[in-house]
Structure formats: structure tokens, C-alpha cells
Image (tube, rainbow, N blue to C red):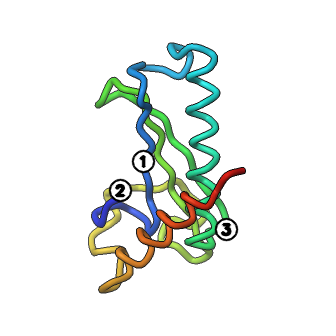
Amino acid sequence: MGKRHRVPGYVCLVSQTHAVDLHDLTEAAAFAFMRDARKVSMAVASVTRAVKMNYEIHGNSIPHLHMHFFPRYRGDQFEGQPINPRRVVQAVYAPGEFERIRNSFVIALGSNTA
């Protein structure tokens, strides 16, 4: 999670096992990655109260498996369309908001055992 992203609550999950694509992982590692993705998704959704979560796996720039989580909100600047990073020109967090969301996410992730 970082301050300079396109939507509040953005998170990137990076595979602990090196792989370029999901199918490069063993079955156990793939299940573990998807289990972790589910946990991250639930934690982000509970903290941000997003109405929808967008997931992206590309690997074109960084050839290591990672998944992006983009919480979506009613009335967000991308409503009804894909996220366009070129349209983001100002900070997406109010003062102190990033720290509050990040801390709440860490707590939610730690309590998420489902």
C-alpha cells in the first residue's frame, strides 16, 4: 500500500515464490497465493467499504507474479470505466487518511482468518 496510487486503499500483493505467471506456481503455491489474495481483498473491502474491487495481474514491466487491488467507490473519478492512471493529477488521500487506512488494513488483515 502506498500514498501515490490511483485510488484510496490500493494494495499490491507480491508472490513469495518467484514465478512470472500464476500457472508457473505449483498447485500448493497457487492455492496459497489465491488464499492470500482473498484475505487481502476482504481486508481492503472491510476497511475502505468499497462497492467493488478490481483485480489486475500483468507482469509486463516486472516479470514476477503480483496482483493489484483497486477498491472502487460510488462517484469515484473512474466510475463506469477502467482506472486510467493518466487522469490522476492530485493526491487521493486527505491529510492523515493514508495512515488511518493502512493501519486499519493491517489490523483487518491480521484478524482475517477465513
Q: Amino acid at mark 2?
A: Pro
Front: mark 3 or 1: 1
The Cα–Cα distance between marks 3 and 2, rounded to whole angstroms, is 20 Å
The residue labelled by disc 2 is 85
Q: Return the residue nearer the eye: 1 or 56.
A: 1
In the picture, measured across the screen, residue 27 lies left or right of residue 63, that is right
Mark 2 residue element = helix
Give the number of marks: 3
Tell which circle, 3 or 2, labels the residue nearer the N-terminal end: 3
| Quadrant holding the N terminus | bottom left
User: On the image, numbered disc 3 is attached to which residue?
Assistant: 51
Residue 43, x across and y down, in percent:
59, 60
Q: Amino acid at mark 1?
A: Cys
Q: Callout 1: 10 Å neighbours few (<14), some, many (20+)?
A: some
Viewer-closest of 108 and 44: 108
Tell whether 93 sits left or right of 106. Answer: left
* Badge nearest the viewer, 2 or 1: 1
**What secondary structure is marked by label 1?**
strand
Q: Contact, CB < 8 Å: mark 3 with mark 1? A: no
Q: At 28% from the left edge and 63% from the top edge, which residue is drawn?
A: 4
Tag 1 or tag 3, which sits nearer the N-term? 1
* Disc 3 to disc 1, C-alpha distance: 19 Å
Q: Earlier in the sequence, mark 2 or mark 1?
A: 1
- Image quadrant where residue 28 sits: top right
Residue identified by numbered label 1:
12
Q: Residue at x 60, y 53 (%)?
A: 41
Q: Residue at x 52, y 53 (%)?
A: 82
Up/down of 113 relative to 97, above or below: above
User: At 44% across and 69% down in the image, what residue appears?
Assistant: 8
Q: Look at the numbered disc 3 and give the secondary structure of its residue.
A: loop
